[in-house]
Image (spheres, coloured by chain):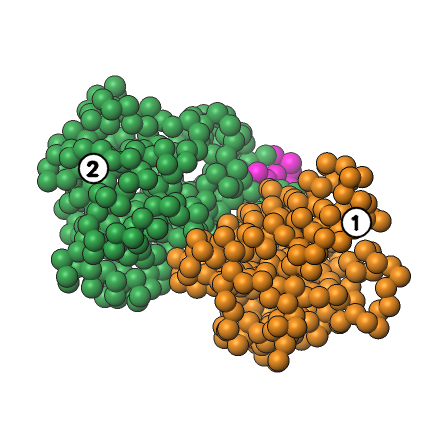
Amino acid sequence: MKLAGRTALITGGSRGLGREVGRALVARGARVVLVARDAAALDEAVEEVRAAGAAAGGEAYGLAFDVGAKEDAHRIAGAASALIGPIDLLVHAASTLGPLPMPLLADTPCEDLAAVLDVNLLGPFRLTKIVAGSMALRGGGLVVFTSSDAAVEAYPRWGAYGVSKAAQDHLARVFAVEMPEVGFVAFDPGEMDTKMHADAMPDADRATLASPEVVGSALVRWIARGDTKSGARVTVKEITR
Amino acid sequence: MNALETVAPAMAPRAARDVRVLVVGAGRVLGEIAGPRFAEALEPGDLVVVNDAATLPASIPVRTAHGEELEVRLAGPIEPSAEADAVLLGSGDWRTPTEKRPAPPAVARGEVLRGGDLALEVRSVAGRRVRVRLAGDRARALAALWSVGRPVQYAYVPAPLALWDVQNAWAAEPWAVEMPSAARLVDFAVLSSLRARGIAVATVTHAAGLSDVGSPPIDAFLPFPERSRVTSATMRAVRETRARGGRVVAIGTSVVRALETAARAGDVFDGTTDLRIGPGTALLATSALVTGVHAAGTSHHALLAAFASSEVLAEAMRASVARGLLGHEHGDVWLVWR
């Protein structure tokens, strides 16, 4: 996908992978809307991302809404399209781990599991439903779901999160067979040095973790190459050449 | 046509699968088909054209600097200048028909109307028609508009409509003041059945505008000029379809207005159209129209008269009443072949 002048909507845009994907896209001349709940953190991220793309003609805007809230889904999609036009690329980078420290599944209150599914599964489902339909009628577009190896492996204390990511991977697969005009991929970025990783595993050796900047730009290079196979689950290792 | 000869309104949003299609052509009512089987009413080689405009939260409750309440109702999209055309209505929620509301307070050029985090600066006033500008940072102002604004409501619908009630499944740019509601019929299942039958689908983007608001000085101007965009790809599909004897089926009156405007412009169109279509208007692009069941006498009905005589439309209304079809925004539809 040629990225100059393309439009992208990125959730989880105030930090971590979302912000770095935004930065890499804007640096290639894309027009980007970042979404996050925290308006102050979002403003800072937008400033930074905008600066990265000034020379390339890229643009960045922020919308402070909650991906986990049903009533915000059309607000995000509507205001984003009013800002940058119909969306060509949708990146779901917002995720929650649920309550910390992460409990065993049998100790997880039903309400906490539901809250994780709201952000990690229903939120991406709602936004994809709204945005991918117009991609299909316009004849193309790409939706990237951020996955995790917890979607595939059963790790103790990663139950709610892992279930939400496994289900999200399957959203990508089913959307891919039902809507062949649009690309849907589940992307596993591996272990990154992010706030989320620190929340989950505060004692991890940060030197062993990948920088979200490196992973975000690898993802954007891969999108630009255009060899995405719809419905696939891909890891950062598989897309890094 | 007497007053009894009109259908009951649908009281709530309905799923595409529940929509009934009354087929009208060759000077009579031809029959009825269930919405999910819509593709069977068409032939391979036909072209279906939909309006992909998303619906704005066009109904905005605000206060004047003196604290008086009123509704600003957008009449078109937010332009790149952050300005938009709008009309002013008296205060009141969806339960109060607009014609029963008090007159809105007078507003002056330069005045700022506020609702939540949204500030609308009045740029010009002509009676109840105004031009407003979203003040401040564009992204923040749009977020505030989408938080404060509600979709245009209908007094006959008992519960307030949310934004998700008024969006077509594949809509993109938020240009429409009211939902291009005939396209409610075309969900993803219908889209794939159309393609499976060899019927292509093309899009226009058209700022479907205000319907009657109950204020004669406003309603007399309807339909307002509307923002419209028809791409060369869509017009090529229209020409190729007609050249091989296929038919072009417009889903909704806004699509007719867009395609007929573009056909008169020669090819592509990207601007504002004031084309009015009525009895006797030559249809250069469109062969059929899918539209909701609306009473005679509305601006909407005038456009239908370009497709069928008043006798045929009266017969279609009698058949709709007899069959128990539902009317208005969430109701059933007619497929009218010219």
Q: Residue placed at 35% from the left, 51% from the top? A: B192
**Callout 1 environment at 10 Å: few (<14), some (14 to 19), or many (20+)?**
some
The answer to whether residue A100 is above or below residue B241 is: above
- Give, as a three-letter code, the residue at label 2: Val
- Position in image of residue A138 (x %, y %): 40, 61
In the image shown, does B114 or B51 lie closer to the viewer?
B51
The region drawn magenta spans B60-68
- Position in image of residue A152 (x %, y %): 66, 56
Please identify the quarter of the rendering in which residue A39 is found.
Answer: bottom right
Of all chains, the one bearing label 1 is: A
SS label for mark 1? loop
SS label for mark 2? strand
In the image shown, does A120 or B318 lie closer to the viewer?
A120
Question: Pointers 1 and 2 in contact (CB under 8 A)?
Answer: no
Horizontal side, residue B111 vs residue B205: left or right: right
Of all chains, the one bearing label 2 is: B
- The colour of chain A is orange
- Position in image of residue A84 (x %, y %): 53, 62
- Give, as a three-letter code, the residue at label 1: Arg
Q: Which residue in the structure is indicated by mark 1?
A: A157
Q: What mark, if any, has residue B23 been given in the picture?
A: 2
In the image shown, does A35 or B144 lie closer to the viewer?
A35
